Image (cartoon, helix red, strand yellow):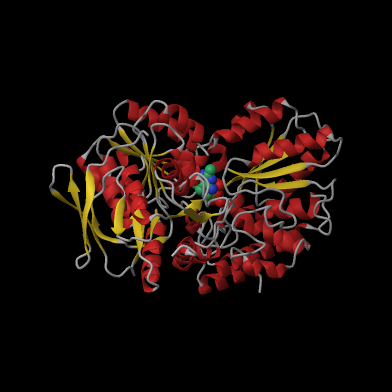
Amino acid sequence: MAHISPTYKLLKIDEKSFLVFYLTNQGEEVYVSTLVKQREEKVKTRDAYGEVLPRIGEKDEDIVVLTADLAGSTRTKYFAEEFPERFFNVGITEANMMGMAAGLAMEGKKPFVSTFSIFATGKPWEQIRQTIAYQSAPVRIVATHAGLTVGEDGASHQILEDISLMRVLPNMKVIVPADSTQTKAVIERIGKDLSGPVYVRLARAGFPVVYEDCDFEIGKAEVLTEGSDLTIFATGLMVANSLDAADDLADQGISAEVVNVSTIKPLDVDTVLESVEKTGRALTVEEHNVIGGLGSAVSEVVSEGHPVPLKRVGVEDRFGESGPAYELIEHFGLTSDRIAEEGESLLDGEL
Amino acid sequence: MDTNTLQKKANKLRADVLQAVTNANSGHPGGALGMADVWTVLHYKYLNDRPDQPRWEDRDRFILSNGHTCPLLYAVLADKGYFDSSELDHLRELGALLQGHPSTAKGTPGVEFSSGSLGHGLSFSGGVALAGKLDGRTYKTYVSISDAECQEGQTWEAAGVASHKKLGNLCAIVDYNDSQIDGKVSEIQDVAPIKNKWESFGWNVIEIDGHDYNEIDGALQEFNESEDPDGLPTVIISHNVIGKGVSFMEGDYHWHHGVLTPEQLEQAFSELGVS
Ligand SMILES: Cc1ncc(C[n+]2csc(CCOP(=O)(O)OP(=O)(O)O)c2C)c(N)n1
């Protein structure tokens, strides 16, 4: 099985301070993150992106930013205000924008390309395939407004297929930050050298803040709470909901391990397999179609590497619709209650 | 309907748009207000449709490509009786008949095309017009597109094919209001000289002031009377003012989307002469 080898192994989770430590191969303790104690505050991941982009841009003149008439919505306008000479609003020409980004990247620039996720993945998919992925051009596609939480604009704008579309492309990396803190760490990391392209999925609505502080390494999934009865693999907004679900399950005496799979590709196969070897059950949770996203990625490695009962929670192969963001999360069954229910049902009849 | 009646109708539709967007607390009123005059003449004087038979086979097709302006489409359809006007109060709500962008998924009567992603409508309309010719039907196909959609490559692919395939039964109406989300079209990514572009793609081009009822009527009449389905497709380039009819919205691209305060709504209604 081809996969990345992990540098870190889980050492301990400090319950009091919510620090998570990992042990490296060399035996040294490495700090990974500090979780917030109460997940109350909601912050938009796109706001975090808008804030950090000019900060990395000021340190690296190779960083250029492109958008297709969505500078305000994607928050790239803050970069534009500080570095207008390195900012290009190309109008509504997404396919062209991807081609230009590939050209910029092949000439040594570090292009960040931002628009709504549907127009960053679906519309210019073949341009991404031919000119970005095939050439392994290090283009940073940072898309906002993914998933149901787009809200009122409705199905046309609520892409639930982007992870799938990007994951299938050779050379492409796929990252879904869990919250605004992790978004900043992700953007800082991808502002550095990259061997190929990366897709980062951000959202319109505010997400509960999960991390007080964190480091980010591409390809590393992170165990946030340890458990023994089942593993909940979550990504994006669903990390917060899964942590809530794990709390509910704990009240019922069920011990759930929650893993933040922020890098969906390359998937952290070792962390996934080690966790299911321990718990024997897997639940995947994502604000995405159950086909082709996190659920598929985890199913693929679990069924090949260590088959265990597995359930996928996500949008059941349908389009979204208009409505307030969090009403839609409820309507489509992505709440912590639903996650806890599905977790429970995985255990039903077996305990 | 005489011009005076049409103008009143247009202002009533504008008020409906603003009311619906205000209720929904989100949406795109600016472009809709700018297109209201052209649409009113088209929908109340030329479009051959039957609101009680939304899928009547010989109806003229009206396709909205710049789907974000759909509150205007919904106001027209409600006014014509395609559905109850109380639906306007539920725009963008969970489960609503009137989705944030036009959707055929909910079976909304009168909605011919699911839009929201810009640049798709002209191709779809080319297909609809071609089907009409294949079936020997005399319906006409009208499609509303925006100036910013003229930035999309697909619009020009569609334009080239429509003229080469002689879709003389197709009429595109461009909302040339020089506005898009981030600024003026002429400053973000210009589409000028727009007339020459359409001409060189083989279209019959009519350029009008989209708030001058004589010019609107003249353009629609010219297309409507053209009997040759194998002629050139027609494009009406309508110079519109975003937010037309409401002083504080006129000409300001920021009103691409946005919600009026209760005071602004009141002022807008009074300027539109609607109570
Ligand atoms: C393919 C695509 N890219 C981006 C968007 C996001 N978006 C919605 S409206 C708009 C621009 C609006 O300009 P225009 O269509 O001229 O509308 P107006 O403001 O004049 O109503 C953009 C970029 C979209 N809907 N579709």
* Residue A219 occupies quadrant: top left
The answer to whether residue B37 is visible is yes
Tell which of A169 and A305 is nearer to you: A305
Q: In what quadrant of the picture does the C terminus of chain A appear?
A: bottom left
Residue in the picture at 37% in, 73% down? A251
Tell which of A328 and B205 is nearer to you: A328
Q: In what quadrant of the picture does the N terminus of chain A appear?
A: top left
Tell which of A223 and B7 is nearer to you: A223
* Residue A331 occupies quadrant: bottom right
Measured as percent of width and height from the top left, residue B38 is found at 69, 51
Is residue A269 shown above or below A281? above
Name the side, left or right, on which A16 lies relative to A69. Answer: left
Tell which of B255 and A14 is nearer to you: A14
The answer to whether residue B185 is visible is no
Name the side, left or right, on which A292 lies relative to B228. Answer: left
Residue in the picture at 20% in, 68% down? A16
Name the side, left or right, on which A86 lies relative to B102. Answer: left
Measured as percent of width and height from the top left, residue A265 is found at 38, 41
Measured as percent of width and height from the top left, residue A87 is found at 34, 40
Residue in the picture at 21% in, 57% down? A12
Measured as percent of width and height from the top left, residue B137 is found at 86, 38
Residue in the picture at 66% in, 36% down? B123
